[in-house]
Image: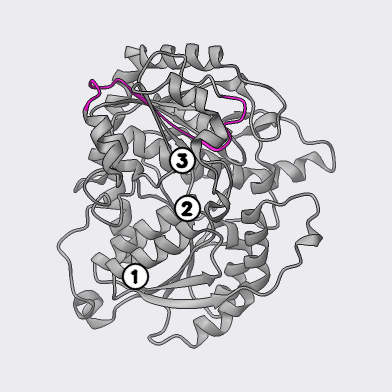
């Protein structure tokens, strides 16, 4: 976030230090941006407390929390234990993260006493978007300003802001394509149902919205949100991205010595990186001829992921790609990987954090959306000129089989696309400019911090 020279808490606001309470949600995609904002605030001397919801869903989440508090010991940890949730109430889903969000929403009333009894007094709350509808009323009751951290693209924020209006206009009719004023039309097939419950994701009553993006990549939705085209009187929207790791990137290398050594042997911009959750119908994914790294994940929760690559892909596949392809199930520092000069393309599930990290390092993205907001993120990536989207490849729940030949053809197309590579190079420069002193994101975060100090 490129903060200015650090100030001690006593130097801020004439000795009155803002005390900000962060309320994260579940999932690494949600924790990553909030932890990076926490690190930036703490580095500038702002008094920060973090609600740590227990138990965590995954081991990775636990490690993330442990790392944050180890690196920033001045950050206060406020534990909040979830109330029991009967998963049988949700017979249509076994998604552990969906169930976690439901448990969070049902337990969030515990925040009232936490905020009211905090010392020093909480001067502002920053909540994850998934908890907005529950947290804002509590903040209002306690007269504490409440801001939303939106972890995905401003394109999705624009849809989220317009969707309640769209539903009212339907007057009970069927949902179809959605025309977001000043932005674009979102096809019905790209709407993320889990994120469009108007009772859970209404941001209009918040005091401000922080978005992990930068103005260059999403000018249309940002202009529409800020200019009142979508919702008159919408809260201020602060673009503060691309956010940087809260530790030193986080360490030298990817965190995997074997992987670092393998990457070091590859030609510049030759490696196709892939992060995919379901390898079952993609066992011929190495047919494009390029060196490739595959970070393999077979379950949604890492504690349940015990299978070895050979168990999932078959020994024959691993033998065929030996030397040219590397498959790992270990933890990989994604940003360190994307910075490696050997990496020439990133095949991503469609998370916005990944798209921004890749564009910041000048790596084109081939987006294969999986669920939720991923298709909106893919639309944003294509519009920004930082990636391509295989629109007909289907996503979670589809029966469509994507063949190895299709994957190989698309990978070759993207790897050979010099126009796209040049566009991503421009985005890389603009990303660096946005967070540098005087850049749009730099100015926005400092304007927001000034607002906190004046609370």
Q: CA distance from mark 3 to mark 2?
A: 12 Å
Which mark identifies residue 69? 1
Marked residue nearer the N-terminal end (3 or 2): 2
Marked residue nearer the N-terminal end (1 or 2): 2
Residue indicated by mark 3: 352
**Callout 3: 10 Å neighbours few (<14), some, many (20+)?**
many
Which mark identifies residue 28? 2
Which region of the structure is painted magenta?
265-282
Residue 267 in which image quadrant: top left
**Residue 201 shows in this picture:** no
Between marks 3 and 2 in the image, the one whose residue lies nearer the viewer: 2
The residue positioned 52% from the left and 38% from the top of the image is 155
**Callout 1: 10 Å neighbours few (<14), some, many (20+)?**
some
Q: CA distance from mark 1 to mark 2?
A: 16 Å
113 or 293: nearer the viewer: 293
Residue 51 image position (x, y, % from top left): 48, 72
Q: Does residue 148 sit above or below 46 in this rendering?
A: above
188 or 250: nearer the viewer: 250
Q: Are marks 1 and 3 in contact (CB under 8 Å)?
A: no
Residue 275 image position (x, y, % from top left): 46, 35
Q: As drawn, is 97 to the left or to the right of 84?
A: left
Q: As drawn, is 201 to the left or to the right of 390?
A: right
Marked residue nearer the N-terminal end (1 or 3): 1
Residue 306 image position (x, y, % from top left): 54, 49
């Amino acid at each position: 976030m490129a903060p200015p020279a650090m100030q001690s808490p006593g130097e801020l606001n004439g000795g009155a230090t803002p005390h900000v309470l962060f309320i994260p949600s579940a999932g690494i995609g949600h924790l990553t941006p909030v932890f990076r904002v926490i690190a930036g605030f703490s580095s500038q001397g702002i008094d920060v407390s973090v609600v740590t919801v227990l138990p965590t869903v995954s081991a990775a989440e636990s490690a993330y929390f442990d790392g944050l508090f180890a690196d920033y010991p001045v950050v206060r940890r406020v534990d909040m234990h979830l109330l029991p949730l009967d998963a049988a109430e949700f017979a249509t889903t076994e998604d552990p993260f969906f169930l976690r969000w439901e448990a969070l929403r049902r337990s969030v009333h515990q925040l009232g006493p936490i905020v009211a009894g905090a010392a020093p007094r909480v001067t502002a709350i920053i909540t994850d978007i998934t908890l907005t509808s529950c947290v804002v009323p509590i903040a209002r009751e306690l007269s504490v300003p409440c801001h939303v951290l939106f972890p995905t693209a401003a394109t999705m924020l624009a849809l989220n802001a317009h969707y309640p209006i769209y539903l009212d206009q339907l007057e009970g009719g069927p949902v179809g394509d959605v025309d977001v004023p000043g932005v674009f039309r979102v096809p019905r097939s790209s709407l993320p149902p889990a994120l469009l419950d108007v009772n859970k994701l209404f941001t209009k009553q918040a005091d401000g919205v922080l978005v992990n993006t930068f103005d260059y990549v999403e000018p249309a939705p940002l202009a529409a949100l800020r200019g009142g085209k979508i919702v008159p009187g919408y809260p201020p929207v602060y673009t503060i991205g691309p956010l940087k790791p809260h530790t030193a990137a986080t360490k030298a290398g990817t965190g995997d010595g074997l992987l670092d050594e393998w990457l070091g042997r590859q030609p510049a911009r030759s490696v196709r990186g892939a992060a995919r959750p379901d390898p079952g119908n993609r066992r011929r994914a190495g047919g494009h001829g390029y060196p490739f790294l595959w970070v393999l994940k077979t379950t949604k929760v890492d504690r349940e992921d015990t299978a070895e690559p050979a168990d999932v892909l078959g020994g024959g596949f691993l033998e065929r790609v030996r030397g040219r392809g590397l498959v790992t199930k270990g933890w990989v520092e994604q940003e360190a990987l994307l910075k490696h000069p050997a990496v020439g393309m990133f095949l991503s599930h469609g998370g916005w954090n990944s798209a921004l990290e890749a564009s910041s390092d000048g790596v084109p993205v081939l987006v294969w959306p999986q669920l939720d907001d991923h298709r909106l993120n893919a639309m944003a990536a294509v519009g920004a000129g930082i990636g391509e989207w295989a629109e007909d490849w289907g996503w979670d729940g589809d029966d469509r089989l994507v063949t190895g030949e299709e994957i190989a053809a698309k990978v070759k197309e993207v790897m050979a696309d010099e126009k796209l590579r040049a566009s991503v190079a421009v985005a890389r420069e603009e990303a660096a400019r946005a967070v540098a002193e005087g850049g749009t994101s730099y100015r926005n975060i400092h304007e927001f911090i000034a607002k906190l100090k004046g609370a």
